Amino acid sequence: MLRHAIAAARAAKARLVLPGNLYNFGPDAGDTVAENAPQHPATRKGQVRVEMEALLATAASDGMRSLVVRAGDYFGPHGPSSWFGNLMVRPGRPVRFIIYPGRRGVGHSFAYLPDLAEAMARLADIEALLAPAEVVHFRGHWLERGEEIAQAIRRVAGVPRAPILPFPALLLYLGAIASPTLREAVEMRYLWHLPLRLDNRKLVSLIGAEPHTQLEAAVRGSLEALGCVPKGERDAPSNASPRAT
């Protein structure tokens, strides 16, 4: 798919934008991950990501332009395959409990999709200033204690005593015997055990302050989209002013 996208971008003389993630990185990437951190993935999916980015870098040698924006775990409206919507809460149902898949007290990176999209749009506005094969990191919501997102869900949903349950690891491993999707989830669990914080200084140097919706407003937008809380007014994003046109 990426090879076809590269061919299409080359024919259209357009820059190809790839939403990236943390799969590229293994435990040796360090606590704060810059764009040039070592890429020694511990998983098959991570190897695929490294190969994809290598294809883009190679394509740049004959004039094809690309942009990779790496980010943490996606959540927000129109994010149907996220851990947030597939595991932490139950779409279409009020919040009665939250499942948190990570280790308590370990930092975790989350990316609210509207903020990430706004950052990409701002980069598109300065496309001519970017390197041929540009790579930037989107910091998003770095939570020193990853379970803070589960606590925010409780506050937004108005259920301060809702239990925050651990990940049902035994059921996952048993289910993985028969389910390819669950086997993939097992493979990626290490990312919930490592505090990988993305260094966004390069992004900030290019577009200024990173678009950032406050955590509770982002969680509310996500829960509303999933049908877990009624739709209503929510806080306006901070540092997410409309782009100049």
Image (cartoon, grey):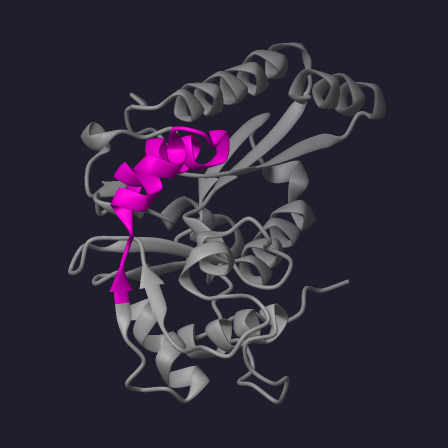
Decide which of 75, 68 is in the foreground and name it. Answer: 75
Task: Let me know if residue 31 appears in the view.
Answer: yes
Q: Which quadrant would residue 67 be assigned to in this image?
A: top right
Overall secondary structure of the magenta stretch?
Answer: helix
The residue at 33%/36% (across/down) is: 174
Q: Is residue 125 left or right of residue 209?
A: right
Image quadrant where one finds the C terminus: bottom right
The residue at 50%/79% (across/down) is: 94
Task: Let me know if residue 196 appears in the view.
Answer: no
The residue at 62%/28% (across/down) is: 66
Percent x, y for residue 156? 43, 83
Decide which of 128, 197 is in the foreground and name it. Answer: 197
Q: Which residue lies furthest to the right in this view?
A: 12
Q: Is residue 69 positioned above or below 9 on the image?
A: below
Percent x, y for residue 58? 56, 11
Q: In this view, does 203 lie to the left or right of 145?
A: right
Percent x, y for residue 149? 34, 68
Decide which of 123, 73 is in the foreground and name it. Answer: 73
Magenta segment includes 53: no
Q: Is residue 116 left or right of residue 204?
A: right
State which region is magenta.
165-191
Percent x, y for residue 25? 32, 30
Image quadrant where one finds the N terminus: top right
Q: Is residue 224 positioned above or below 118 on the image?
A: below
The residue at 56%/30% (across/down) is: 131
Q: Which quadrant would residue 234 be assigned to in this image?
A: bottom right
Q: Which quadrant would residue 43 be assigned to in this image?
A: top left
